[in-house]
Image (cartoon, rainbow, N blue to C red):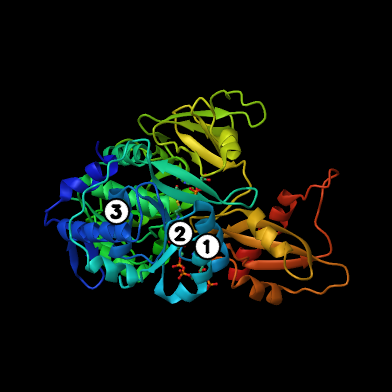
Amino acid sequence: MTNPLYDALFAPHEGKSSPFLLLAGGSILSHAAFLEMVDRMANALTALGAVPGDRVAAHVMKSPQALALYAACVKSGTVFLPLNTSYTPRELDYFVGDSAAKIFVCDPSEEAAVHDIAMRTGAHLTTLGADGLGSLTELAETQEPNFKAQPRSLNDLAALLYTSGTTGRSKGAMLTHENLLSNAKSLVEAWRFTRDDVLLHALPIFHTHGLFVATNVMLLAGGAMIFLPKFDVETVMAQLPKATAMMGVPTFYTRLLEEKQFSSDLTTNMRLFISGSAPLLAETHKKFELRTGHRILERYGMTETSMTTSNPYDAERRAGTVGFPLPGVKIKVCDAQTNAEMPMGEIGVLWVRGPNVFKGYWNMPEKTREELRADGFFITGDLCLIDEHGYVHIVGRGKDLIISGGYNIYPKEVEMFLDSLPGVKESAVVGAPHPDFGESVVAILVAEDGARIDAATIEAQTKDDLAGFKRPRHIEVVAELPRNTMGKVQKNQLREQFADVFQLAQD
Ligand code: MCA
Ligand code: AMP
């Protein structure tokens, strides 16, 4: 038996001195050196008691060692569970507990704050910092630099990625070796990646975009990555001339366009700019082409499905569309109420089927049945239409979701937190257009009878418990929320009412 992901993504590079990670400060980590790190790390995980199938939760900053941890999970047959670095201990508690993680890797600075979580859930706590140091790497350094890849089947889990849900409770999407491998293969081909490519990697590695779309594609193609800790516009501009491709969320592109010095002189070596995770405004697409001569290639996907559609590499990349289904992926557009397939050109909910579609939600069979049908189609909740040329347009969301700078926020989760604060009777959370993040969070609150609440106090109360990107950036206290005759809060009315708050704040 083999290990499908390891065999395809990592094994071909064993012993190769080819560059893999080009790091800030100029040092280069070869494929061979990276794989040696992976073997030591896999031995360390085993020494800590992890066996194939166990979940390894990672709340760690981006570093070569953090990437090696992902690879070590693949090689040891354990299930990698990456967690957004901005999650607070309150949020981490749920993920570590729900997944019954065997190992919980955290940043050394938060060890004391999450100690109780590990005690309560029975996870073994170990540390890894942004500098690559911590108790996990200390243990890894004492281990042998060889580890035999553990046998796995295509249907075995490789990763568990939590995505928030409309009910306010996050769902763990179970991703198999086949899901990740089939998608990486499609993308390498669709986007023509080869070993000559150098990808500018400024995305976080705890989500599908930076981890699977970017990293798996580069591993399969055999190229190198300029591996930056985060998106910093100055650094990105300085590194662009050395890169051939970049993947980013729309905020990357709008931030680059805001820089006067950003010009085609910096992009002559580039062959491809890719955007996804949130809608790229047609206006940004056009401005980018005017400035650089490059037409950004927009694609569309989800944690549950990895990538499903992409604009073409060779044919026309159409602004405001996400292109065509990838090879092997079947899509259809269905009526939200009847599930009947819609005629071409009409708006409905996008359904997806293919080897890329996940196995279901961890420990949530009912939720899985609701969204992943017996015939293999996954109901994305995104509203789209397919035009007469076959291009898919994402025109909205059937789900109550805000996407801020590429991060998803489910209003229900924030509302549940706000409702629990002293003096708050109820709340409604909506997204409003934001010049930098695309969309951002607005909270509208009603005080309990006789209580006084104000925006500043509420804001302060969100600091310790809500990840930064989820925190409302505008808070309004009102006498009552608008409701329809059925008593349902009229979110569309609130969205309209607060549509300008971030624009006005900028003027
Ligand atoms: C950071 N902050 C944010 C965001 N990011 N607030 C709202 N939305 C955000 N996205 C807040 C922090 O909490 C902090 O707040 C302040 O901004 C500065 O933090 P910093 O880390 O310096 O922020 P930044 O460097 O400006 O980050 C913005 C960013 C980053 C570069 C756009 O968010 C980013 O890299 N986003 C990529 C997300 C991504 O990879 N998504 C893929 C999901 P305070 O000052 O109050 O503390 S996968 C997916 O969606 C599917 C599968 C797909 O199709 O790809
Ligand atoms: P996540 O659950 O974090 O994987 O985010 C997936 C969601 O991001 C999708 O359901 C879409 O709503 C959105 N998304 C991803 N790519 C695009 C895109 N190119 N255009 C519009 N929305 C997108």
- Residue 92 — which label? 1
Indicate which disc, 1 or 3, sits on the residue closer to the N terminus: 3
Asked whether the viewer can see residue 507, the reply is no
Residue position for label 3: 71
Which sits in the foreground, 475 or 59?
59
Give the x, y percent position of residue 122. 48, 61
- Residue type at mark 1 is Leu
Q: Is residue 148 left or right of residue 314?
A: left
User: Residue placed at 60% from the left, 37% from the top?
Assistant: 366
Establish if 288 lies above or below 443: above
- Residue type at mark 2 is Leu
Indicate which disc, 3 or 2, sits on the residue closer to the N terminus: 3
- Residue 442 — which label? none
Residue position for label 2: 83
User: Judging from the image, what secondary structure is the residue with disc 1 in?
Assistant: helix
Q: CA distance from mark 3 to mark 2?
A: 16 Å
